[in-house]
Each structure stands twice: as C-alpha cells, then as structure tokens.
Amino acid sequence: MAKKKSNIFECQHCGQQSQKWLGKCPGCNSWDSFVELTALQVEHIKQTKTKTTFKSKASSIVDIEEENIKRYSTTNEEFDLVLGGGIVPGSLTLIGGSPGVGKSTLLLKIASNMAKNNQKVLYVSGEESLGQIKLRADRLEANHQNLYLLTEILLESIFQEIKTNKYNMVVIDSIQTIYSDNLSSSPGSVSQVKEITFELMRVAKQSKISVFIVGHITKDGSIAGPRVLEHMVDTVLYFESETNNELRILRAFKNRFGSTNELGIFKMSKDGIQSAKDISKKFFSSNKNISGSCLTVSMEGSRAIVLEVQALVTNSSYPNPKRSATGFDTNRLNMLLALLEKKLDLPLNQYDVFVNISGGIKLKESSCDLAIIASIISSFQNRPISKETVFIGEVSLTGEVKEVSKIENRLNEAVSLGISKAIVGKKTKNDTGIKQFAVDEVTKMIELF
C-alpha cells in the first residue's frame, strides 16, 4: 500500500511551510532546508487551528489577587542578581553563549549550590558522558547527594525520570540534542525545538519545577533555532566573553520576573567559574597616567563600574579618515567628533580616531560622552590625564554637558577606588568628600588641558 503523503513541507531553520518542496526558503534564504511533514504532524497542526466554542473564563483584573513570587537563592550573588533575586519555581530559563564560554560549567555549579540547599536537582546532558560530567564536578567541588546526572536525549524518557523522582530543578544541556518520538524530524530541527520547549514549559508550570535550557548559538551570535523559542521561555540569558579574557559576562535579554538591566560578572579560573567580587579593579589600570586614557563610571543596572576609556588619534593616510569604536556606538562617536570640530576647531577630519572601552564592556548609556571627549583631546594633544579623576556627563548636539542619573552611586564607587576628583555636568551634594568640577559647556573642556 502506498504511503500517504502530507503535501506539507516545513523549513527546518525558520519554520515556514509550503505546499510543495522548495530548494531555497523564501523566509530565511537557506538552501535544502524543507522537509516533508508526516500525516500525523499535519493532523496535529489542523487540530490546533480548529476553532472551538467555550465558556469565558476571563476575570476582571481588579478581582485578581497579587501573586507572591517566592524565590530560591543559588548562593551565587552574580547569578541571583541577573535573575532578579533568585530562581522562581516553575520558571523556564534559556541560557546561550559561544562554545567553550562556560555555560555547562556555570549551570553545573548552580545545580550543585541548589542541591546543597536541600533541593533535588537533575542535570540532563545529551552531549557528555557521566564520567566527563563527574570530572568537571570534581574540579568545581560540585558533588552532592541531591544532584543527579542523566545522559539521555529522548524527551519521553526524561519526563518519566522527572515524574518518578519529583525534582525541584532540571537542567537540559542542550535543547538542540533532545528529540521527541512524536516527531520524525532530527534533533535540533525547528519542529523538534518547538515541541520540546512547549512540553518543558508545560511540565515546569504544572509541577512548579525550575527548568534551565542550554541553547547553541549561530555565527551571528543569536540562539540557534526558531525565534519562538525565546518567546516561550520566561528568561533569556546570554553568557559572553572577550577573546583571551578570563572575565565572563552574563546578561538578561528577557526576564519576566526581574529587570533586564542587571549584569553578572564572573571570572574563569582553574577551579571553574566564580563570582568576580573584586571586579571593579579589573576594568582599569591606575599604575600611571597615559595620554588618550581617562576614567568614567557606568551604571550596569544597579551596579556602578569604573571603566577606562582609551582613544588614539593619529594622522590619516587616506582621504577618508578611519573611525572605529569597540564597546561604544560608532554613530555616537562620529557625532562627538563633529561636535569637537565645530565647537573647539579641532582638525579631526585629518586624523584617524579609534576608541576602546577596556574590559569588554559594551556601553549603552550616554554618561561616558565626557570621558570619550576627554580621551580624544588627551590623545590629540599628547597630554596625559590623572587617574585620580573621573569624567561623568552626557554631551548634547549643542555642546551642553548634562547631568546623568544615579550620580551619587557613581561618585561613591569612584571614591571607594581611591579617586579624588570628578568632572561632572552639574555639582551634586555628596558626603564622600570627592572634589567636583562642573563643566556646563564642551568648549570649557579645552581649559582642563
């Protein structure tokens, strides 16, 4: 008997469907990505699209009692900070990052910490053997009776294990290696990732189990798989690092239970990943004063970090001078350079300008505008700036220097690191005793040199 065909094809990269096979997907432009769905899959799609009549269960928002969210601390201050105060029972968290950045190492350590807090934790790996995980656990000192390991890639077997032993927390490493028997496509495909994530979300919400999912990333830095994966989970974390740098940065790009402005900073050592408690001194050098280098204070969520801004201004050998910025918006750099040419008559159109924020931090706020300008002028005039001074202020297109938010937190952090002077847009009351010098116009910056 001939096999019944479904006549529905789905792209394994973006999920777009077609009535016929296509060599190139019109949605994501990938080649040879269309796979024919089975009749069972097509029937499932039709059932989900069928409209049903039901009695309204909606409630007025004024009649709903506020839910008290209970959190469990992981005893890791940096990880708790990014999550918003700890792990929420029933939450589904996705963490992505480059290969080798330390995702598995970090989650194994977090799982061990939760096990020590009398939480029953299951660590599921589809990429490593039990012996390999045990070796890492010995190095991290992550051995505990309440931490269980499972090497399995079949979703139904994982659910059976969760149902049998009633775990409080589950780690899936990684989502691209797990597959379900209900689908015939290969692990990591769009249909598999969507189905598995939905089932994990259902189990997490019904059983109040905290689930962490490790996701692979593509060449452009986004998490591999359909975009719906990030929409379905409660929290999306990215674990980042700079090349040949011991520092690791954990950012939240989505968080239903907290802020996405917080930043977790870790350092890689021979004993694994640890919280960087003395991180403030990692982002700048206070050994000597160098031209083209100055300090500023950036707010990353509730954390104030003193950063070193570096600039290099050199003669250009091209008709169009180069403009490059690492850790800073290039468009904003071009704006500040145009402002310096207009207000201070600096012939920067004849020079190449390079700006770098040390430590791998990517600045998203404009409070470091004053520091960028100071470092450029310092490099242009070859005059060093004292490392006992910080520059904090936003510069407008009119050349006005504006005050920034949370200035007291910034000044307190600067004083704690031995900084005695601050160049700001507007003086503010501060009990730390730091000397403040107000600069309301960018034209007055030249007077500081």
Image (spheres, rainbow, N blue to C red):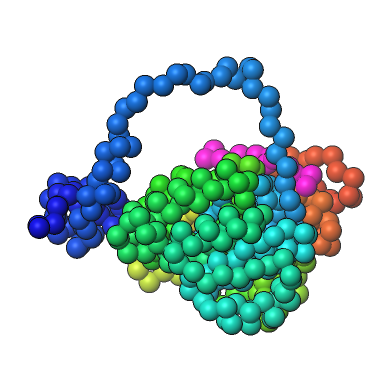
Where is residue 24, by image quadrant? bottom left
Q: At 58% across and 55% down in the image, what residue appears?
A: 163
Q: How far across and down, in percent of the image, does residue 57 sit?
A: 51, 21
**As drawn, 60 above or below 413:** above
Q: At 77% across and 59% down in the image, what residue appears?
A: 118
Q: At 71% across and 54% down in the image, what residue appears?
A: 80
| Residue stretch rendered in magenta on the structure | 391-409
Q: How far across and down, in percent of the image, does residue 93 sit?
A: 56, 52
* In this picture, residue 441 sits left or right of residue 187: right
Q: How far across and down, in percent of the image, does residue 219 sit?
A: 38, 66
Q: Residue furthest left?
A: 2
Q: At 26% across and 43% down in the image, what residue appears?
A: 43
The quarter in which the C terminus is drawn is bottom right
State whether residue 443 appears in this view. Answer: no
- Does 399 lie within the magenta span? yes
Q: How far across and down, in percent of the image, does residue 155 sit?
A: 46, 60
**As drawn, 107 above or below 28:** below
Front-most of residues 5 and 364: 5
Where is residue 414, by image quadrant? bottom right
Front-most of residues 271 and 107: 107
* In this picture, residue 436 sits left or right of residue 271: right
The quarter in which the N terminus is drawn is bottom left
Front-most of residues 164 and 23: 164
- Does 359 lie within the magenta span? no
State whether residue 72 appears in this view. Answer: yes
Total residue callouts: 0
